[in-house]
Amino acid sequence: MRKPLISGNWKMHHNHFEAIQTIQRLAYALSSSDYENVDVSVHAPFTDLRSLQTVIEVDGIPISLGAQHCHWEDKGAFTGEVSPEMLAKLNVSLVIVGHSERRHIFGESNEDINRKVRAVIAKEMTPILCVGETTEEREDGRTLEVVEKQLEDGLKEVKTSDVASMVIAYEPVWAIGTGKNATPEDAQEVCKGIRAKVENAWKSASEQIRIQYGGSVKGINAPDLMKQKDIDGLLVGGASLDPDEFSRIIKYRLLD
Ligand code: PEP
């Protein structure tokens, strides 16, 4: 049985004061029983991580600390970059890799993404590998082909046991931050294709790997998405900035 994972991607929002307030308000909105049904992570900007680590540890908040990306090397002349080793030192446990904004705005290639996936695993953190098609690719009927290629390249040389414990986020590019989201049935179809691809290449990992859907998730559409057989969680951008709305998404069963 896969425990759902609901992750908030704060993108470039919330300075460290706002981050502290947000995590405290989120923790207040959630009760201990909520965490029995679902794992929760927040992926904050680098400048917030040290403050969030302290609050999470001192207050005993059962939310996992996440990062939004990293470099693949441990150290070196890479101005502006942060290494997986530095993140691990802050008790970061999950790292988003290959978010579409990193792919499209910052030109990250599948090869870079594969290096990052392997570097994150090497530091015993869990990568959330993002995959998804653009509008044009969807209109050309190439969604699965694109997603499968991103998986093949992103997971090159990753061991089956590591694939099993990681997370794939299916995020159609056209649905991110646009207010348009895939229908639960369309999202399920692609997530099912992702699981089939994992089964094909990494066999037993397919039963364990968690697959999230991301793209304009809100409290109102979370329950129907979470009902789908192959959707094991959600990656939430804009709506995760507001602790009340994010807590409604996490408590999705209540809205059911
Ligand atoms: C995201 O940032 O991964 C995302 C899905 O954003 P939004 O929920 O705002 O579409």
Image (cartoon, grey):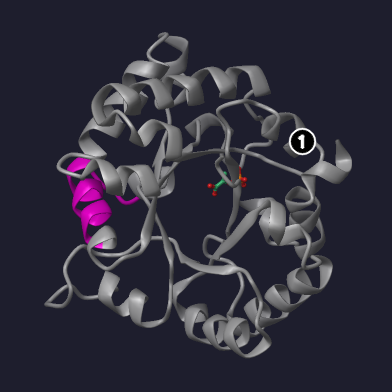
189 shown above or below 255: above
Residue 4 or 147: which is nearer the viewer?
A: 4
Q: Which residues are magenta?
A: 105-119
Whole-percent x and y of residue 32?
77, 68
**Residue 55 visible:** yes
21 shown above or below 184: below
Pointer 1: what residue?
A: 223
**Residue 107 visible:** no
Q: Secondary structure at mark 1?
A: helix
Tell me the amino acid under the disc marked 1.
Pro
Q: Name the residue: 67% across, 57% down.
A: 240
Q: State the image quarter where residue 56 is shown.
A: bottom right
Q: Name the residue: 68% across, 35% down.
A: 226
Residue 10 or 156: which is nearer the viewer?
A: 156
Q: Is residue 193 left or right of residue 29?
A: left
Q: Name the residue: 69% across, 36% down.
A: 179
Rate crowding at label 1 as few (under 14), some (14 to 19) or many (20 or more) other CA atoms within 10 Å: many
Whole-percent x and y of residue 233?
60, 42
Q: Name the residue: 64% across, 17% down.
A: 185
The image quadrant where one finds the N terminus is top right
